[in-house]
Amino acid sequence: MTRRCASLLGLWILCSGGCEPEKPPAPTKPQAAPAAEAGEAGAAVLPADAKDAILTYAGDRGQFKDTSKPADVPEEARGLVRVTLLQGPQPPDGTVWAANLKTPEADGSWKLTTVPRAQFEELALGLGRSSAVELPPGLEAPVAAPREADVIVYKTEWCGVCKQVQSYLDKKGVKYVAKDIEKDSAAAGELRAKAKEKGVQTGSVPVIDVRGELMVGFNRARLEQLL
């Protein structure tokens, strides 16, 4: 009995000094709800002043054009405009924001809809505008615009080299349009705008436009490559 009591006493002393009372498990913190994904309905709009946004539309000659002013977008391209928000929600991966600038809201803003990136970029292929694209409701594919000749020769009546270029194109059977920039002020303005866009210095003629590529003067080898 003495030994048993001593053993029990020792066990009690050991537990009282080294055994901590069992603690209840700490409560688990509730997990935060996942953030709403950018691109859900009503998540993004283009304000009326288009502040902090870049507008991209399908232009002629298979090229995109950018602007920050909705009024600068041509009427035939306003039905489908890509909107890049510099400040605001971003669309889901693989898509872009798109707006129909023909249908503003009552406050002048525009609703944004997601469109697959590849689908939007298809509009800049080929002629730059295509109607054979299925789009979400509310969006309109750009209207196909009549395409000008692939080759335009900007010339003057007194320019001998201009005549050489025209003779060369005639012999090759290349269809082209010749525009006299001294007699046609619209042609002169058209050439200035193209040269500014391409960063080409023009101060002489001829200037040959081959599908958007400008060549000043008559370089037969380069013209062969462009054709």
Image (cartoon, rainbow, N blue to C red):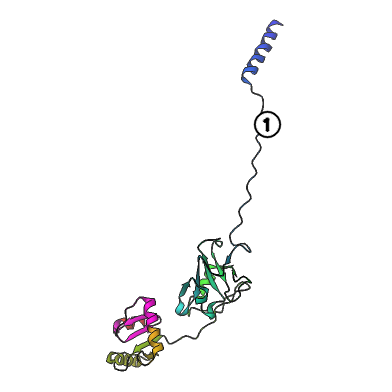
Asked if the stretch drawn in magenta spans residue 29, the answer is no
* Range of residues picked out in magenta: 192-221
Residue 26 rendering spot, x and y as whole percentages: 65, 35
Of residues 116 and 44, the one drawn nearer to the viewer in this rendering: 44
What's the residue at 54%, 73% (across, down)?
81
What's the residue at 47%, 74% (across, down)?
64
Query: Is residue 209 shown left or right of residue 80?
Result: left
Amino acid type, mark 1: Pro
Q: Quadrant of the N terminus?
A: top right
Residue 196 rendering spot, x and y as whole percentages: 37, 77
* Circle 1: element type: loop
Q: On the image, numbered disc 1 is attached to which residue?
A: 24
Q: Is residue 85 above or below residue 32?
A: below
Residue 8 rendering spot, x and y as whole percentages: 68, 12
**Count of labels in the image:** 1
Outermost residue toward the right in this view: 1
- Which quadrant holds residue 131? bottom right
Query: Is residue 211 shown left or right of residue 19?
Result: left
Of residues 116 and 187, the one drawn nearer to the viewer in this rendering: 187
What's the residue at 39%, 85% (across, down)?
189
Q: Is residue 20 above or below residue 41?
A: above
Q: Judge the density around disc 1: few (<14), some (14-19), many (≥20) Cα neighbours within 10 Å.
A: few
Residue 148 rendering spot, x and y as whole percentages: 45, 86
Q: Is residue 134 above or below residue 147?
A: above
What's the residue at 39%, 91% (across, down)?
184
Q: Is residue 14 above or below residue 190?
A: above
Outermost residue toward the top in this view: 2
Q: Quadrant of the C terminus?
A: bottom left
